[in-house]
Amino acid sequence: MTRLTTLVDSEAVSGRAAVEIARRVDSARRERGVAHLALSGGRTPGRTYKLLASELDSWDRVEVWFADERCVGPQDEQSNFRLAHETLLGPAGIPSDRVHRMEGELGPEEGARRYARALAERVSFRDGDLPVLDAIVLGIGPDGHVASLFPGAPTLDAGERALCLPVHDSPKPPPERITLSLAVLRAARRCLLLATGAEKADAVAAMLGQPSRHVPASLLRRGRLSVIVDDAVAPAPPRAEPDQPNDPGTNPQAS
């Protein structure tokens, strides 16, 4: 089952997410000697990274990856790497040799090919097919996309052995991107999806519904998914049925 946590506002969401990510990192280091953490872009993840930078006493034995990237240079304002560097990687002092950025400036095809090779070389595999990241931080778009996996896109059909994929026709600019595959997201030990603001409410509700290619976030593995949202996003509780008046003809206690 999906773990859904609802908090009062975006700051509380970022704080809880930072604590949860730190806990996952510590657990991975204790159990396997190294933690593999993948990051996404976005407003809420960015604030989470600022809090996360000081949440751990040490960032030793942590390898940092990315869920997706725009095909821009690392210093571009749209770069997920730039966001992560300014909020987490720099403040936490994580050495560059343990930060594996997607080389968006190479273009989607070459960038995806190189990233798939890096994953295969540095991350342990499970069942012989897929590298297993310990935690992936994800946002969600109003259309239900995660990473750069968009509704109905061919990337959703890449298969169970695909690691990293080129994107040429993103409905959000810029059109060219690089993304982890759905198979890699599903193989992760834990995906943490963060959502704040009323504009994400419909997407989160759809994600928690039936799996659908029209809502890529709904295709994540539910048993390995933690969703942390604020009150503006939280699904409305089911409406209670109005009390019915007693019918003396059916109430066994009626005289």
Image (cartoon, grey):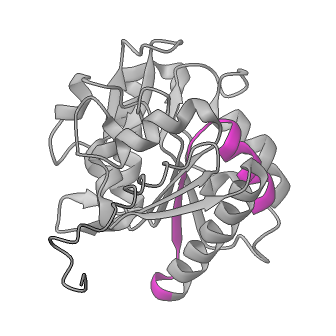
Image spot of residue 128 (x, y percent): 17, 65
Horizontally, residue 187 falls left or right of residue 139, namely left
Name the quadrant of the C terminus.
bottom left
Rendered position, 15 above or below 101: below
Residue sitting at 71 percent across and 34 percent down?
82
Residue 93 seen from this side: no
Whether residue 66 sits left or right of residue 187 in the image: it is: right
Find residue 117 and report its horizontal and vertical position in percent: 35, 45
* Position above or below: 9 against 224: above
Q: Is residue 50 magenta?
A: yes
Counting every numbered tag in the picture gives: 0
Position in image of residue 79 (x %, y %) = 64, 27
* Magenta-highlighted residues: 31-52
Picture layout, residue 153 above or below residue 200: above
Q: Horizontal placement of 148 versus 231: left or right?
A: left
Say which of 26 and 210 sits in front: 210
Residue at 79 percent of width and 46 percent of height: 87
* In the foreground, 134 or 250: 250
**Quarter of the figure with residue 168:** top left
- Compared to 9, does 2 lie above or below? below
Quadrant location of the N terminus? Answer: bottom left
The percent coordinates of residue 110 (x first, y second) are: 38, 25
Q: Could you tell me if residue 74 is visible in this image? A: yes
Residue at 16% from the left image edge and 48% from the top image edge: 160
Q: Quadrant of residue 21?
A: bottom right
